[in-house]
Amino acid sequence: MLEESGRPVTARPDLGVALLTGKLQVPTTRRGTVSRRPLIDRARASGARVVGVTAPPGYGKSTMLAEWADLEDREVVWATVDRLDDDPASLLSLLALACAPVSPEVAEVVSDMRGTGLTVLGRSAPLLAAALVRTAAPFVLFVDDLHEAGSPGCQDALEIVLGHVPAGSQVVISSRHDQPHLARRRVEGTVMDIGPDDLTIDVTGARALFASAEVDVDDSTLATVVERCEGWPTGLLLCALLVRDGGAASSLSGDDRFVADYLYRECLARLPVRTQHFLRSTAVLDHLSAGLCDAVLGSSGSATILRGLDTSNLFLIPLDHRRRRFRYHTLFREFLLDELARVEPDAVTALHRRAAAWYEANDLGPRAVEHLLAAGDRERCCLLMADLALPLYQSGQVAVIARWLAAVGDAAIQACPPLAVIAAWKAILLGETTDAERWAAALEQVDTDSLPDDDRVALESARRQIRAAMCLDDVELGLAHTRFAVEHEPAWSPWRDQALHLHGSMLLLTGDADGARDAFTEASACATQAGNPDSVLLSEAELAILAVEDGRWTTAAQHARAAVDVIDTHHMEGYSTTTLALAARARVALHTGDVVAAERLLARGMRARVQCTHVLPFLAVKVRLQLGYAFMTLGDRVTALHLAHEAASLLRRRPHLGLLADETATLLERLEHVAASPGAPPLTPAELRLLPYLQTHLTMAEIGDRLFVSRNTVSTQVGSIYRKLGATTRGEAVGLAVDLGLLGA
């Protein structure tokens, strides 16, 4: 079916909470580990606000962080990153949740750590940074496995947060790979680096490690082993286990620094066949629990095996204090996956599919998608992605959707019409003009003859809604498109409220205000029941504007307040769909004389208009007209005129916008009779896209890479930003932008 189920992406409380709680818990320090106390003491005394622990697997990074946490007398908070956090909004949400105990102010901004890429960098990251810098009591935040969130967006957001660690506090980050955000801060002297050389173990440490494994070797043999393993902690531990189980330390060749395969095979060969099978099969899992392992194996008894592995200290790391959830040591898991591919290659796909089925059955859809991707099950994966996309968008996890779409590839998306519809809407709502036009065209090419009747009608409705939203046809045909959608989207469809809103918008373009009012009223009610905040705020904003045009200011205030309340309640700051509501509320505030509130709302609206582009033209033009009227009321002719010209430019790209062409001409005509006002024009959408990057240490060329423009374009836009804000440096520009509400709150 093309329709989405509308099921919210929320895990069953016990599972979802348990997984999140495990990521925020300080791991238990395991017995037999070598103390890093001198290194920890040096890092604590360094005064460095950020400590980067960077080394390949097997160097004891997590163990060191856990020992440090045990020794710490400051407030300790912890965050373990996994691959689902490779999204700026998800990463910031995790960090904010971890830090919530250190400050009520941090706890207050947890829900604001979401949105699109521009909003996350321009608003969420500065909000968390500002909350952290005002924390009164010193704290230490440990961030483990940061390499799982290595995308540029995550790195940029993290750099902003780390730039505001208060004096007396520290953030300690472990990663398998180099951390670019640290390189840019080393020149400031606020970073201490801990690398592989710092984490190697000498003979004294090796002696303690062998003793913990109840292994006694002579000094000469121990020195040889340390030399051959080059101080690699995991290699030494494996060697100790090998000797404990009857092997000879002197038998190690030592020619290869990474002797993991040989040592792991020795460990694995001594285990019962059933346990070996368990280890290989469950290596496909990031996290292990008895129920999940039973489902993947298609058998029972996993709880007993997990308890035995935990007791034997066989590279199983507990994720909760009740020792019900675990993960394998990274190197051990990599070895087990190699063994699985060698011994049971045909089982890998089935194991991932079973894991996906378990996660899906337990309302952990995003994790199910990851396993389906690993299984190569593109068809099932695409259908599940289409089912999850709408609630993920509404929760601010847009980058997750984008990553999935890139992972399955264009061919798989084109073969799955429901996902192609999602790809088109994602591009439309984010202002990704090239992709929006490409996916809209691709949908037109889908052959519907072989589809079941219900699917054929659903696809036709989806295509017509996209054509209407993009105003690809004249107004009358657009109205016919939305009328078809309203007639064919049933009451239970998650697309019905959108069809009603689009229908109201087309009616407005033809001048039928009464019909539009009815459609918006029904759309708002339908969206409220379906839990779709986008259609609620859009429809309520339109109802507010209709009331303003009729002079019914009390009614306008009610609708405008309802729309903005949805934005604030659902933390949708920065979404393109919010701009009209903010503009309408600002006009109401100006009518009542509340200039301060109006200016605050207008700053938010100007920032959010960036993603209102010609691929959603009726909204993009209307947004600029409403903002323009508000600025004209404020007496800011320069900004109002700039917005009117933006609207006129959009009309040249999309001329079939009915009465909006006349309304744009009317605003331009009225502005000719408004006295000139001092001041610079507002930042353009392109300049607003660039502005958040001024908070980072990225060079002009690096910013250009992020925005897919040339270094010269970036340089020109930065110069324009400086002139308009009256700044001469990055820091000054950022400070002024914060004061104007263009960054941060």
Image (tube, helix red, strand yellow):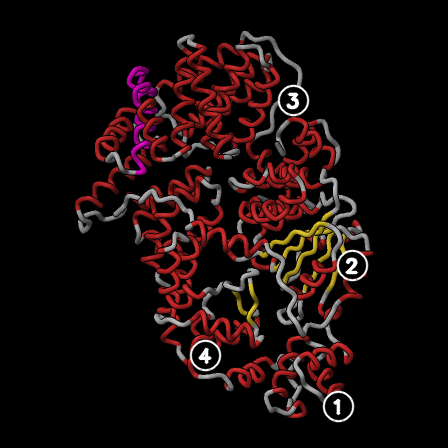
Alpha-carbon distance for marks 3 and 1? 79 Å
Mark 2 touches mark 4? (CB < 8 Å) = no
Q: Secondary structure at mark 2?
A: helix
Q: Compare marks 3 and 1 and give the one earlier in the sequence.
A: 1
Amino acid type, residue under disc 2 in the picture: Ala
State the residue position of label 3: 680
Q: Compare marks 1 and 2 and give the one earlier in the sequence.
A: 2
Residue density around tag 2, few if under 14, some if 14–19, many if 20 or more, within 10 Å: many
Alpha-carbon distance for marks 4 and 1? 33 Å
* Side of 7 relative to 163 (left or right): left
Q: Which residues are magenta?
A: 494-519
Nearest-to-viewer mark from 3 and 1: 1
Q: Is residue 705 above or below residue 193?
A: above
Q: Is residue 314 above or below residue 79?
A: below
Residue 310 drawn at (x, y percent): 54, 72
Alpha-carbon distance for marks 2 and 4? 41 Å
State the residue position of label 2: 43
Amino acid type, residue under disc 4 in the picture: Thr
Check residue 275 in the rendering and tell me which mark sits there, or answer none.
Answer: 4
Q: Compare marks 2 and 4 and give the one earlier in the sequence.
A: 2
Amino acid type, residue under disc 1 in the picture: Asp
State the residue position of label 1: 218
Mark 1 touches mark 2? (CB < 8 Å) = no
Nearest-to-viewer mark from 3 and 4: 4
Alpha-carbon distance for marks 1 and 2? 33 Å
Q: Compare marks 3 and 4 and give the one earlier in the sequence.
A: 4
Amino acid type, residue under disc 3 in the picture: Ala
Q: Is residue 670 above or below residue 98?
A: above
